[in-house]
Image: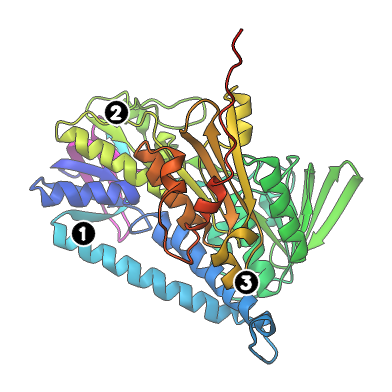
Amino acid sequence: MPEIERFDILVIGSGEAGKHLTWTMAEAGHRTAVVERKYIGGSCPNIACLPSKNVIRSAKANWFARHGAEYGIQTGPVSTDMKGVLNRKRKMVEDGVQVHLDRFKASGAELIRGEARFVAPKTVEVRLNEGGRRMIAGDRVFLDLGSRSVIPDVPGLAVAKPMTHVEALDLDRLPEHVIVLGGGYVGLELAQALRRFGSEVTVIERGQQIAAAEDPDVAQALLENFTSEGIEVLLDTRVHEVGGLSGQKVRVVAENGHGPQNIEGTDLLIATGRTPNTQGIGLEAAGVELDARGYIKVNDRLETSAAGVWAMGDCAGSPQFTHVAFDDFRVVRDNLNGGSRTTRERLIPFCMFTDPELARVGLNESEAKRRGIAYRLAKMPMAAVLRAVALGETSGFVKMLIDAQSDRILGFTVLGVEGSEMMAAVQTAMVGGLPYTALRDAIFTHPTTAEGLVFLLASVPAVARKQPA
């Protein structure tokens, strides 16, 4: 057995939280090691957030080319070069990985390429990618294990070798007909991109609406937009069986209110959820407990059941966004430096990068009603936002929830062009505890999407005053 090498800081996983903690601790003079089995920098710069937005942008370029006449631009026949799309994405990924490698080297941290498994508390055996083994122990250990796509237990599905987002973002060919299982963020973003590249696309969603966590009016607007682009969406549909092989020919046997459905296509994309990478790495030997869903149990300071061990990001059950993982890092970093930061009551924004974007922060109407929170509603179409008019992209709407008895902003949702930037302005106001009137009375640059807030909030209903007894 190799001799145990000891470090002050041991990080397992170089994802968003893990890499920032590694760099921070190493630059502060701690002897630091990070173990990464595959993706330097984690999933975001390699196979998820940034690559998907890169591909979505290529799909938008295709859309612009096909709609050039609407902008006074004459073009010839338009086609998609998927090898070109792939090469553009790969170049961005390769450049990003090199930036990460340079940062690890500059920080003084040791990057160990291999797969870690706990053999004792705070001690892992690493099977090195290039061969051989190392035993690594850390005085303090930080877990950033990430998550992976779930393949549902449907007869024939695994045998059909479906794509997840990883394979879908690595296509060097244009699928003829893609069947997408799942109407959430990943499924909808990729469905629209593939349709714009020229594939036939069918989305199968088991729930009664796509984007299940959103308000019905948002889901309906998304559905109408997808239908207008030629995407078939089957709602309230259960998949019973899958046959064939993705990439050649697949058949999905399903059922909904219209009876049995047989959907045939060439490719199958699974986007039905994620599961944490917590199995098979010996967490029981480390004294780290899991919850019923397989996520690492943590308190609101991200401390695990094992002394001197923290967990961050997806594996800790945090909302599965890169920006949340970064905040997990900040919580841990500040507490290591004597702070008292927690994950309680974080204001977490959401954004789905369909076209138009869907962005939300705080409560939506469905949540407010479920929790019995009274609110005033301001809502207007994106056609009333002059930035959208100037861009010629006026689909969607914007709405804000305001407390029924005060001017406190409860939540904000926008489905519209550049919606994420408008949402960021509202989020800033909410973080600062500003009343909605501060945005209503602000001077925003013309014409920006944020300027639309002024007109949205000019129509806020007055506070309902109680009548004297």
Horizontally, residue 463 falls left or right of residue 105, namely: right
Q: Nearer the viewer, residue 286 or 261?
A: 261
Quadrant position of the N terminus in the picture = top left
Amino acid of disc 1: Phe
Amino acid of disc 2: Glu
Circle number at residue 392? 3
Residue 387 location, x and y as percent?
54, 66
Residue drawn at (44%, 34%) of the image: 317
Disc nearer the start of the sequence (1/2)? 1
Q: Give the alpha-carbon distance from disc 1 to disc 2, as whole Å.
A: 25 Å
**The magenta stretch spans which residues?**
120-144
Q: Give the alpha-carbon distance from disc 1 to disc 3, as whole Å.
A: 44 Å
Within-10-Å neighbours for mark 3: few <14, some 14–19, many 20+: few
Residue 392 location, x and y as percent?
62, 72
Up the image or down, 333 lies above or below 161; here it is: above
Residue that carries the numbered disc 2 in the rendered image: 303
Horizontally, residue 381 falls left or right of residue 340, namely: right
Within-10-Å neighbours for mark 1: few <14, some 14–19, many 20+: many
Up the image or down, 420 lies above or below 317; here it is: below
Q: Residue furthest front?
A: 468
Horizontally, residue 289 falls left or right of residue 251, namely: left
Q: Nearer the viewer, mark 1 or mark 3?
A: 3
Residue drawn at (15%, 57%) of the image: 107
Mark 1 falls on what kind of element?
A: helix
Residue that carries the numbered disc 1 in the rendered image: 104
Residue drawn at (43%, 48%) of the image: 441
Residue 453 location, x and y as percent?
51, 52
Amino acid of disc 3: Gly
Q: Nearer the viewer, residue 306 or 452?
A: 452
Residue 69 location, x and y as percent?
69, 85
